[in-house]
Every structure is written in structure tokens, then in C-alpha cells.
């Protein structure tokens, strides 16, 4: 009988051990973040992995909203949105834009909605989302831009329309709002060989005919930011899911001419953008010349597990550089002043 009890006790302990480990892992994932750790698992405030790929961030009042692709292992499931007060800790707010159940819709379930970006239109009071849209069952043949609007930053966003801007193919894209409130759509076109820029209409819902070729260098993943009266443009090469060397251009005018400055990355694996691809450059309010480079380290075998690389943009000799840091916090910007 004693041997049976010892055996039973041993079995109970063996079964309870994994539960204790799981609880420890869960509590660890819910621990409050105080720093950025590029490339590591990043959990939201409920302990779930953040699922917001190819995204961008919008500041509304004192709250940041992070929009990004909701990815399953291989499928795309809409656009997620998270909120944060400090940029380290993110609360899941839900699906901002959900694929349509109507099979005839441009955004029918099974479509691709990539690289979502959201800007706020002060004249209309609407939050406007643009994204790269590929129609269901057509792979990357459609090459369209999609637009949706909402009354609140968390949505739900209402799909408005999709199109090829001024008849041009539109794939990887970004949005930029200048100091005067004018908004611009920057996008890869002509099978990604061209990079184009179009000024948007006053309501931000359509492109105007002010649409120009910036350069034809087979670049994608554009991210624009402005500092000291100059415009900077980060792009990647076109190598599918595989990482490649980034490039940085500068101009005095958004429509160019754009001057190539070279690769802004410095550090281990810099020539492959640390294994990532640019998606957005986030200005940090309240800090002088402070910008965060946002990139995705894609995992094509499990897209949901693609990691985030957030790194500080530093100005050395007046030129933006992006060093690799295993861990850093916003105090880093104070150190470089």
C-alpha cells in the first residue's frame, strides 16, 4: 500500500510540475515591460503575443495606437489594434478592420490586407486607414490600395474602396502627414521596380493626380520621416521574405530629387537590416530629434511568430544611423543630446 501511495504521490508531482511552469511563464509574460528588446517575444498586457505585423503607430492625445496585420501561421486575418501610454506595454483593443463575410467584397475573407497605416483627418474628424490589398485567390496580381475609415482610433473601421492609384500598381506602402496637414501615400509600383508618391485628397480617402515617380531602384517597405526640414526615406530591397540591405535617401522636397545616403544600419548583421524589414519610423513626442525605427523580422514558416525590431534612430554628424541594441529604453534619447 505504501509503495502505491508513493507511486501515486510521484505521479501527482509529475503532473503538477508542468502546470507550475505554465503559470510561471504566464506571469512572466504579463510582467510590466520597462525596455525594448528587439527580436524577442513581445506580449500584450493579457500575456498574449502581440500580433501586429507590417504596422504603424498613431498618437492620439497621450495614447499610442499600434495597427498591424493580424497573422495566423500562413493566413492573414485582418488588422489588429493595440493601445499604450508608454510604448513598452500594449493593451489589445481588438480587430480594427475585419475581412468581410460577403464573398463579393474586395476584402472578403482570404484576401490580403498588408502594411496598414492610420492617420487622423482634423477636417473630417475621421481616422483613415490605408493598406496594400490583394484580392482573394489572386495571389499578388491585384496590387491595389485599400481605404477604410472609423470614428474612433480603435475602430471598427468601415471599408470604403480599393483601387490602383492613378492606374498604377500599389503594393508595399506607407503614409506621411506633413506639418501643413497634407497627407501622402508612398508606394511600390510596376512590380516593385518603381517607388511613387501621391498627395492625398483633403479627406485623405483618394489620391490626387499629384503623383510622381521618385526613383526606379526595385525598392519596397517605404518609411518616411522628417527632421530639421529634411525628409528621410528608408526602404528595403525586394527579396521576398528574406532580409536584405536597407537604404536611406534624403530630400528637401517630398517629390524629390532624392539623394542616396547609403545603409544607415551599423552593427552585427547590419547588411541584412538585423534580419528585419522596415515598416515605419515613429517620432517620439517630447524628445528632441527622437525617432524609433520599426521593422519586422519575418518568419514565413509561421507568420504570426514574426518578431518586431524597434531601434532608436540616432543622428551622427547630421545623418540618421540605426545601431543594433540588445535592449534599450526611451532614456537612450536623453543620453545622445
Image (tube, rainbow, N blue to C red):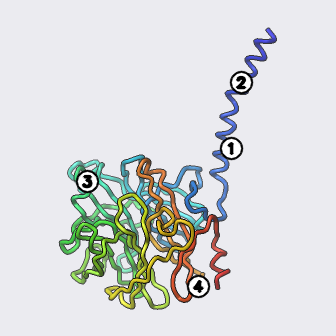
Chain-order first, disc 2 or disc 3? 2
Residue for point 25% across, 51% down: 136
Q: Determine the CA span between mark 2 and mark 1.
A: 19 Å
Judging from the image, what secondary structure is the residue with disc 1 in? helix
Identify the mark at residue 49; answer none if there is no mark: none
Residue extending farthest left: 167
In the image shown, does 79 or 328 lie closer to the viewer? 328
Chain-order first, disc 4 or disc 1? 1
Residue 288 falls left or right of residue 278:
right
Residue 267, can we see it? yes
The image shows residue 42, relative to residue 328, as above or below, that is above
Residue for point 52% across, 69% down: 64
The crowd level at tag 2 (other Cα within 10 Å; few <14, some 14-19, many 20+) is few
Q: Which residue is mark 1?
A: 24
Identify the mark at residue 139; answer none if there is no mark: 3
Q: Determine the CA span between mark 4 and mark 2.
A: 58 Å
Q: Determine the CA span between mark 3 and mark 4.
A: 43 Å
In the image shown, does 1 or 95 lie closer to the viewer? 1
* Quadrant for the N terminus in the image: top right
The crowd level at tag 3 (other Cα within 10 Å; few <14, some 14-19, many 20+) is few
Return the x and y of residue 115 as percentages of the image width and height: 38, 64
The crowd level at tag 4 (other Cα within 10 Å; few <14, some 14-19, many 20+) is few
Judging from the image, what secondary structure is the residue with disc 4 in? loop
Q: Determine the CA span between mark 2 and mark 3.
A: 51 Å
Q: Which residue is mark 4?
A: 288
* Quadrant for the C terminus in the image: bottom right
Q: Determine the CA span between mark 1 and mark 3.
A: 42 Å
The image quarter containing residue 231 is: bottom left
Judging from the image, what secondary structure is the residue with disc 3 in? loop
Q: Which residue is mark 2?
A: 12
Amino acid at each position: 500500500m505504501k509503495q502505491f501511495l508513493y507511486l501515486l504521490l510521484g505521479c501527482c508531482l509529475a503532473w503538477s510540475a508542468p502546470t507550475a511552469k505554465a503559470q510561471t511563464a504566464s506571469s512572466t509574460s504579463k510582467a510590466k515591460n520597462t525596455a525594448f528588446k528587439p527580436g524577442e517575444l513581445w506580449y500584450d498586457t493579457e500575456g498574449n503575443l502581440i500580433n501586429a505585423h507590417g504596422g504603424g503607430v498613431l498618437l492620439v492625445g497621450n495614447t499610442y495606437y499600434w495597427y498591424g496585420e493580424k497573422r495566423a501561421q500562413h493566413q492573414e486575418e485582418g488588422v489588429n489594434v493595440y493601445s499604450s501610454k508608454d510604448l513598452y506595454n500594449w493593451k489589445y483593443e481588438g480587430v480594427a478592420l475585419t475581412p468581410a463575410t460577403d464573398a463579393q467584397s474586395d476584402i472578403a475573407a482570404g484576401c490580403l490586407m498588408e502594411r496598414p497605416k492610420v492617420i487622423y483627418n482634423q477636417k473630417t474628424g475621421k481616422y483613415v486607414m490605408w493598406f496594400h490589398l490583394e484580392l482573394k485567390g489572386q495571389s499578388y496580381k491585384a496590387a491595389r490600395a485599400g481605404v477604410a475609415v472609423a470614428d474612433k482610433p480603435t475602430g471598427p473601421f468601415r471599408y470604403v474602396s480599393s483601387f490602383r492609384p492613378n492606374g498604377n500598381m500599389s503594393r508595399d506602402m506607407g503614409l506621411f502627414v506633413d506639418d501643413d496637414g497634407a497627407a501622402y501615400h508612398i508606394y511600390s509600383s510596376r512590380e516593385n521596380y518603381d517607388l511613387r508618391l501621391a498627395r492625398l485628397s483633403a479627406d485623405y480617402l483618394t489620391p490626387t493626380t499629384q503623383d510622381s515617380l521618385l526613383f526606379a531602384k526595385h525598392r519596397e517597405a517605404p518609411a518616411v520621416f522628417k527632421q530639421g526640414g529634411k525628409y528621410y526615406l528608408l526602404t528595403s530591397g525586394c527579396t521576398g521574405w528574406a532580409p536584405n540591405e536597407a537604404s536611406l535617401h534624403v530630400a528637401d522636397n517630398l517629390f524629390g530629387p532624392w539623394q542616396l545616403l547609403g545603409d544607415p544600419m551599423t552593427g552585427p548583421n547590419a547588411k541584412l537590416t538585423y534580419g528585419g524589414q522596415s515598416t515605419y519610423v515613429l517620432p517620439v513626442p517630447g524628445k528632441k530629434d527622437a525617432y524609433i525605427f520599426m521593422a519586422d523580422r519575418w518568419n514565413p514558416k509561421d507568420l504570426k511568430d514574426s518578431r518586431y525590431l524597434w531601434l532608436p534612430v540616432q543622428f551622427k554628424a547630421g545623418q540618421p544611423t540605426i545601431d543594433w541594441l540588445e535592449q534599450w529604453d526611451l532614456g537612450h534619447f536623453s543620453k545622445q543630446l
